[in-house]
Amino acid sequence: MLWTFDAMEIDQPASTLRACGLAFGYGAEPVQHDVSFDVKKGSIFAIMGESGCGKSTLLKALIGLLRPSAGTVHFGAQDYWSLNEAQREGFGRRIGVLFQGSALWSSMTVAENVALPLQMFTRLSAPSIDALVQLKLSLVGLESSGSSLPADLSGGMRQRVGLARALSLDPEILFLDEPSAGLDPVAAKRFDDLILELRDGFGVTVVMVSHELASLFGICDDGVFLDAQSRTVIAHGAPKMLRDSAANPAVHAFMARERPESATPPGGVNP
């Protein structure tokens, strides 16, 4: 269910995201330019590319942490960056974000971490918040871990706590930044399965930054590939499709985890 906040003079956003001609970066030189794509409702959309190409920076532009130097970010029919600050704050409550490494408050218990967005952005009573926290933790299989501190949990469990917190306000779109980074294969597969269950069971749309091939091929049904050299999108499509039919050698090398020919050392033998 979606909780009602103070009325605002903006259209209610649909669970669809569109980026049009985005340029973004730090300082005068853009990290990426002319970035455009559509995220379909109910899809799991991948932002792919080599390290340093700007994947996480693009995510910041999409969730309101970095204003792009050009272009628009539309949620439904509404351009996020055309809103004033108060409107953007209200609009941002309809998205959930899992930052890389879970980004939990180490001095707060699991339950307190998950409760924080509810305390900040709703007027719910303490008993109602406690009940919702228990519900969100049960969704990620951690209903008995509310009193634990993050340091007491495994990496996979901390990621699931971060996911429960991202789900606390019943978001329409869920943004994940390298959610499987640092997890062992079993924990990563368990997390991927959880994302699929949330998408299939609740209809949430997912936008995921990742370089993990198992996750990209296993759960993502669309995506874009950012290139660090040309600083723009060089491929669109499902990761499996890009693996099997991408014409660009950089995309093929990434998807097949092969070295591009230019990286072959003298003598023609890869180390």
Image: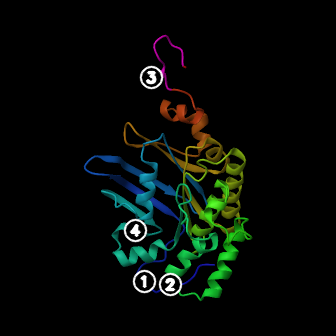
Task: Tell me how far mark 4 sits from mark 2, CA to CA.
Answer: 18 Å
Q: Nearer the viewer, mark 2 or mark 1?
A: 2
Vertical comparison of 77 with 264: above or below: below
- Residue closest to the eye, 234 or 105: 105
**Which residue has dot 3 on it?**
262
> How would you classify the magenta stretch by its main secondary structure?
loop
Instruction: Please tell me which of labels 4 and 2 falls first in the chain.
Output: 2
Per the model, the C-alpha gap separating discs 2 and 3 is 54 Å
Query: In the rendered view of the protein, which quadrant contains the C terminus?
Result: top right
Kind of element beneath mark 2:
loop
Label 3: which secondary element: helix
- In what element is the residue under mark 1? loop
Which colouring convention does the figure follow?
A: rainbow
Residue 23, disc:
none
Instruction: Kindly identify which residue carries mark 2.
Output: 5
Q: Is residue 34 magenta?
A: no
- The answer to which image quadrant residue 127 occupies is bottom right
> What residue is rendered at 69% in x and 76% in y?
134
Residue bearing the label numbered 4: 80
Residue 8: image tag: 1
Q: Horizontal and vertical percent for residue 93?
A: 49, 74
Q: CA distance from mark 2 to mark 1?
A: 9 Å
Marks 4 and 2: CB-CB under 8 Å?
Answer: no
**Residues shaded magenta:** 260-270
Residue situated in front as seen by the camera: 73 or 167: 167
Q: Position of residue 21 (x, y in %)?
A: 36, 53
Query: Earlier along the polypeptide chain: callout 1 or callout 4?
Result: 1
In the image, what residue type sits under mark 3? Ser
